Image (cartoon, grey):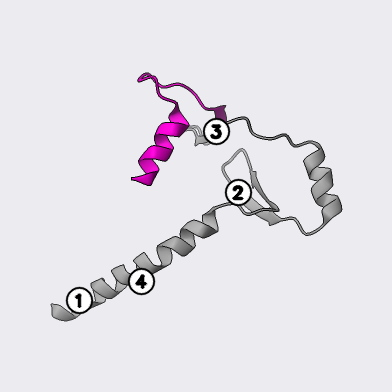
């Protein structure tokens, strides 16, 4: 019994130690593009060529605010701009506050 407690404690400690690295990996970095397909499949690509970056940025525009990505029960990917919920708060703002807790 004591041995299993030690194993579980070590596993919990290892998980806690790697959580910040995982969180840093999920954030976008400068020069990175994230592509999302309609079926929810995602890909990441780092820009290594300035000409390619300039060509991609030609059609891009800065984000005005939060964009939500949702996978519907029909298996399709949906995109929506931030919206006001019934309680009067913005959806993205509420989600980010809940995430920080």
Q: Earlier in the sequence, mark 3 or mark 2?
A: 2
Distance from disc 2 to disc 4, alpha carbons, whole Å, reads 28 Å
Q: Is residue 98 left or right of residue 76?
A: left
| Badge 2 vs badge 4, beta-carbon distance below 8 Å | no
In the image, 38 versus 90, the foreground residue is 90
Instruction: Tell me where residue 55 appears, x and y as whole percent.
Output: 84, 44
Q: Earlier in the sequence, mark 4 or mark 3?
A: 4
Q: Residues within 10 Å of mark 4 (few under 14, many from 20)?
A: few
Spot the residue most to the bottom.
Answer: 3
Q: Which residues are magenta?
A: 76-101
Distance from disc 3 to disc 2, alpha carbons, whole Å, reads 19 Å
Q: Which residue is mark 4?
A: 14
Q: Callout 1: helix, strand or loop?
A: helix
Snapshot quadrant of residue 15: bottom left
Q: Which residue is mark 1?
A: 4
Q: Is residue 23 above or below residue 81?
A: below
């Amino acid at each position: 019994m004591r041995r299993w407690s030690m194993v579980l404690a070590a596993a919990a400690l290892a998980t806690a130690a790697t959580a910040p690295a995982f969180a840093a990996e999920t954030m976008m970095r400068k020069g990175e593009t994230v592509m999302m397909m309609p079926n929810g499949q995602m890909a990441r690509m780092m820009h290594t060529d300035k000409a390619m970056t300039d060509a991609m940025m030609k059609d891009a525009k800065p984000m005005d605010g939060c964009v939500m990505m949702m996978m519907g029960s029909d298996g399709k990917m949906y995109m929506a701009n931030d919206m006001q919920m019934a309680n009067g708060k913005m959806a993205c703002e509420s989600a980010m506050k809940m995430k920080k807790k």
